[in-house]
């Protein structure tokens, strides 16, 4: 069922309305007051304990006494009574509910069970429910203030383009205050609560289809439906609606892709950063920037070139530095024609540079500043203009605000303002906001917005076929166990498992125990030179214990290495299992490849410099799965080792085609590895010259529990 009647109801019943004339109202009574205050136009019914008339509306004492089915029923009663009220609403024919009441999954096991019972009831009737433990929502365009938060009792944000969804009621109140203060228009403010039925993703899905929302802003504490989030992000991208995200818990949420080197390479934010990159989100690192950046995204496309115009050379330089550090925008010098147009309105020392310091000279004439701004906006080499102002004479400030609005409207190019002068130039800033010109108070906020919009436009979202065949085939295997540390299987067992799943390794033989003669016979079968590895339980990085010898030329050398390895194993008290002998290969480069599970986003792939360079270079990229071959190549090129693979400093390129095929094979294992799978690390993977292929030279499978 769609959530149209939930978020745009033509009739509402409020259950649990207080009849007390308190100074500060809460719950359903607060919602009633907010709906009346902001002019809700639909039918409104109220349910109270005792019969009452409030603001001209007669109450009923039980929801079942209504003779019609409200589009939406808001519930603010004790947790133990919520199920009964939902039953009555369903019996009337209502199919949308908002439950303000807390005391459910956030309160412990009993509350979790009761929440699940209510959710089953709602789903059984193909109904929707926001909450429980929500503050509700505001539909600004239709003046539906179905929210209990006290901030709604004052002025609402202007109607605008930003659909805001938050996994926190109180934070939504703070963001509403921000939107009013900064003149940022909202289409919706939705608090999702516990998301027992209707989720964050459902709300996003609705906003994609709602013409009132041009951009979707999110405050997210956890992604509970990663697979659907991936799909809905693709839909938002196709609809031309940017998604701007502030993700909480950046430093607290640990993620274990796998143990070993891969675990060290994958930090707490890498899976989320991969989602941002691949799904086209605009990442916001300060909550205060969420709405300003969303507002910018609603009004400005990706700009590759930009002009900075300022009355302060120093401040203009600050903006130029921030944009340059972002790496997504260049600041081209204005053309000779542009400079000629500006010459009469700027200081004589003006050079053809960018940023442009115009000082106060343009304000000598009424249209001087506007003509300078028009000249820059008309320059074909400039995609957008940012005005960087310090406090200026209020009369000049009025000319700036008027010019910015007119130039933006005339050219269609993005014109933005960075102007930390809320007190001295407050009237000009208010005029800019009324004309829907993006206004920033900080340089870093603007630079983040520019970089975010540019990055989002460059992102790749896996084709729908991959999403369908990958995620629906069982990609989403992450769960609570993904927070556990995986137990490392030894190399022999790891390789046996991976071979059974189609991963190819060089010719190898495993000899159990310390039988030297058996090792020598196995070496003869493999063929010299051989690579010898000592296998000990729980030891992943064998070279640290002297348990690896590469390119052993003959039996005498092999015997010496056998003796040295057994001595090292005894010295370090290792549980020695035996020897692994393999053919010796000479790759042109070594890389690491890891497959792991993120608790929120599920399977992800890690790639980077391998072998002895893994920890030295810390050169790795992380991506969510599934990916197509093009994205796999881009992942390789995102790493410094990619330059070596593609032929650095005149050297021949290595077999990147075979490496991409190998990555596709490994990525395809995720649905087949079973519930005990914790991760796979193959390090090193040797990459040969073009046409030679690749070799998986060492591998470790990480598993939960004692089995596998």
Image (cartoon, rainbow, N blue to C red):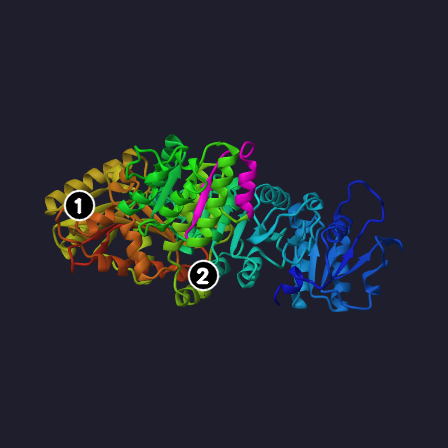
Q: Mark 2 points at which residue?
A: 234
Left or right, 304 with reference to 392: left
The segment highlighted magenta reads 412-434
Residue 626 horizontal/vertical position (percent): 39, 60
Inspect the magenta stretch and tell me whether residue 587 lies in it. no
Q: Nearer the viewer, residue 389 or 623?
A: 389
At 66% from the left edge and 49% from the top edge, which residue is drawn?
A: 109
Left or right, 126 with reference to 639: right
- Quarter of the image where the C terminus is located: bottom left
Q: Nearer the viewer, residue 230 or 440?
A: 440
Inspect the magenta stretch and tell me whether residue 418 lies in it. yes
Q: In this view, does 78 lie above or below 445?
A: below
Q: What element carries label 2?
A: helix
At 19% from the left edge and 58% from the top edge, which residue is drawn?
A: 693
Q: In this view, does 71 lie above or below 320?
A: below
Q: Mark 1 points at which residue?
A: 550
Left or right, 540 with reference to 81: left
């Amino acid at each position: 069922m769609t959530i149209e009647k939930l978020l745009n109801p033509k009739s509402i019943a409020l259950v649990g309305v207080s009849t007390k004339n308190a100074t500060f109202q809460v719950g359903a009574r607060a919602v009633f007051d907010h709906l009346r205050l902001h002019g809700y136009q639909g039918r409104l019914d109220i349910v109270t304990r005792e019969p009452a008339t409030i603001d001209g509306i007669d109450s009923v004492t039980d929801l079942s006494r209504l003779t019609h089915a409200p589009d939406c029923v808001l519930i603010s009663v004790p947790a133990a009574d919520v199920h009964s009220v939902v039953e009555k609403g369903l019996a009337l024919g209502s199919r949308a509910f908002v439950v303000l009441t807390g005391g459910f999954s956030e309160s412990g096991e009993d509350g979790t069970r009761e929440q699940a019972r209510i959710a089953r009831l709602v789903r059984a009737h193909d109904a929707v429910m926001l909450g429980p433990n929500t503050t509700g929502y505001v539909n600004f365009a239709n003046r539906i203030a179905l929210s209990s938060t006290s901030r709604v009792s004052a002025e609402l944000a202007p109607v605008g383009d930003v659909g805001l969804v938050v996994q926190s009621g109180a934070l939504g109140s703070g963001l509403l205050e921000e939107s009013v203060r900064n003149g940022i228009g909202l289409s919706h403010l939705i608090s999702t609560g516990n998301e027992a039925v209707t989720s964050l993703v459902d709300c996003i899905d609705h906003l994609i289809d709602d013409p009132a929302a041009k951009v979707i802003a999110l405050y997210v504490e956890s992604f509970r439906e990663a697979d659907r989030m991936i799909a809905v992000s693709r839909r938002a991208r196709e609809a031309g609606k940017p998604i701007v995200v502030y993700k909480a818990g950046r430093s607290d949420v640990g993620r274990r892709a796998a143990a070993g080197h891969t675990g060290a390479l994958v930090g707490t934010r890498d899976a989320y950063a991969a989602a941002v990159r691949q799904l086209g989100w605009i990442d916001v690192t300060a909550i205060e920037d969420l709405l300003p950046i969303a507002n910018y995204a609603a009004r400005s496309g990706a700009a590759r070139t930009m002009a900075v115009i300022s009355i302060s050379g120093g401040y203009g330089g600050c903006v130029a530095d921030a944009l340059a550090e972002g790496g997504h925008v260049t600041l081209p010098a204005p053309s000779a024609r542009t400079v000629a147009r500006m010459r009469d309105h700027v200081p004589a020392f003006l050079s053809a540079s960018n940023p442009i310091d115009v000082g106060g000279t343009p304000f000598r004439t009424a249209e001087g500043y506007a003509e300078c701004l028009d000249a820059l906006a008309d320059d074909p080499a400039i995609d957008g203009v940012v005005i960087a102002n310090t406090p200026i004479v209020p009369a000049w400030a009025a000319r700036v605000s008027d010019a910015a609005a007119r130039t933006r409207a005339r050219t269609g190019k993005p014109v933005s303002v960075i102007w930390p002068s809320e007190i001295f130039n407050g009237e000009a800033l208010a005029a800019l906001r009324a004309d829907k010109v993006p206004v920033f108070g900080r340089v870093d906020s603007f630079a983040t917005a520019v970089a975010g919009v540019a990055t989002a436009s460059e992102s790749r979202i896996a084709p729908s076929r991959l999403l369908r065949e990958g995620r629906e085939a069982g990609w989403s295997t992450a769960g609570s166990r993904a927070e556990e540390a995986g137990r490392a299987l030894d190399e022999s067992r790891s390789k046996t498992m991976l071979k059974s799943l189609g991963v190819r390794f060089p010719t190898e033989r495993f000899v159990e125990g310390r039988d030297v003669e058996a090792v020598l016979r196995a070496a003869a079968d493999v063929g010299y030179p051989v690579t010898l590895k000592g296998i000990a339980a729980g030891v992943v990085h064998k070279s640290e214990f002297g348990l690896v010898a590469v390119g052993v030329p003959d039996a005498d050398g092999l015997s010496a290495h056998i003796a040295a390895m057994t001595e090292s194993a005894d010295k370090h008290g290792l549980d020695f299992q035996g020897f692994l002998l393999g053919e010796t290969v000479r790759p042109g480069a070594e890389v690491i490849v890891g497959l792991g599970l993120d608790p929120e986003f599920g399977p992800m792939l890690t790639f980077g410099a391998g072998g002895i360079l893994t920890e030295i270079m810390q050169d790795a990229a992380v991506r969510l799965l599934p990916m197509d071959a093009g994205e796999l190549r881009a992942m390789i090129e995102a790493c410094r080792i990619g330059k070596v693979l593609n032929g650095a400093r005149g050297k021949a390129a290595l077999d990147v085609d075979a490496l991409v095929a190998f990555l596709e094979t490994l990525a395809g294992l995720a649905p087949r590895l079973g519930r005990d799978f914790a991760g796979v690390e193959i390090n090193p993977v040797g990459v040969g010259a073009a046409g030679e292929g690749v070799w998986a030279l060492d591998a470790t499978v990480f598993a939960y529990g004692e089995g596998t």
